Amino acid sequence: TGGSRLSEFAEYGTRVGDKPLSPRANESPRYKSTWALLSDPTRGNASELWWRVGLVLAAINCLVLALAATRVNPRVGRSASLVFAVLAFATYYNLLNVGQSWIASGRIGLAPLVVLMHGSVLGLTLAWLWWRQGERPSWLRRGRRAASRPEGQPA
């Protein structure tokens, strides 16, 4: 048929390099399953586990933080909450990276860092939500009322 030819190959491939891939290339903790990381508790595996668990907990904490930061204040520009959210996310993401390197170097363990970082962020954010709802401790309410009364008026 005209100028077309059919070619057949027994094997077709593209050579990338002369050396075959070493079997250790896939042993990096990044490529292991979560169960494999849990079953072999080395520092490298713990740091990768920190990263995986940390992303999930950070997403939950960022959601709660977004709920706390959505209050509208007419005296502040409309983009103030957005600027705060971007800065909070960037700080949190950098802390995840720092935590991963701390675990890999052995400066701190996995469980204490999870409680310290994610627990404190969740606790502070929930306290912020509670405060924003108008809930105040009784000792603070008494102090505010006394401070807001004009002088000379009884309690």
Image (tube, rainbow, N blue to C red):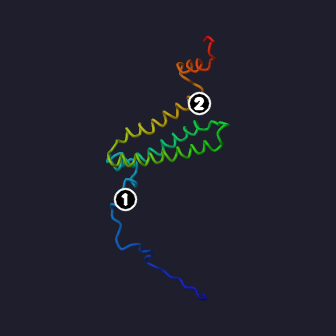
Instruction: Tell me how many marks there are.
Output: 2
Task: Say which of 28 and 47 sits in front.
Answer: 47
Q: Residue at x 57, y 24 (%)?
A: 135
Which percent across, then down, holds residue 80? 61, 42
Determine whether the residue tagged by mark 1 lies in a helix, strand or loop. helix
Which percent across, then down, holds residue 125? 52, 35
Q: Residue at x 43, y 47 (%)?
A: 51
Task: Say which of 114 and 80 sits in front.
Answer: 80
Q: Residue at x 32, y 46 (%)?
A: 106
Point out the residue furthest to the bottom here: 2
Position of the N terminus by quadrant: bottom right
Point out the residue furthest to the front here: 152
Where is mark 2, residue-wise?
A: 132
In the rendered image, which quarter is residue 83 located in?
A: top right
> Would residue 131 be found to the left or right of residue 10 on screen?
right
Q: Amino acid at mark 1?
A: Asn
Question: Mark 1, residues whose alpha carbon is within 10 Å: few (<14), some, or many (≥20)?
Answer: few
Tell me if residue 62 comes above or below residue 138 in the rendering.
below
Task: Say which of 110 and 36 sits in front.
Answer: 110
Q: Residue at x 43, y 76 (%)?
A: 11
Question: Mark 2, residues whose alpha carbon is within 10 Å: few (<14), some, or many (≥20)?
Answer: few
Q: Amino acid at mark 2?
A: Arg
Point out the residue furthest to the right here: 74
> Would residue 102 be found to the left or right of residue 91 on screen?
left
Which percent across, then down, holds residue 94? 46, 48
Determine whether the residue tagged by mark 2 lies in a helix, strand or loop. helix
The numbered mark at residue 26 is 1
Point out the residue furthest to the top here: 154
Task: Say which of 27 and 88 sits in front.
Answer: 88
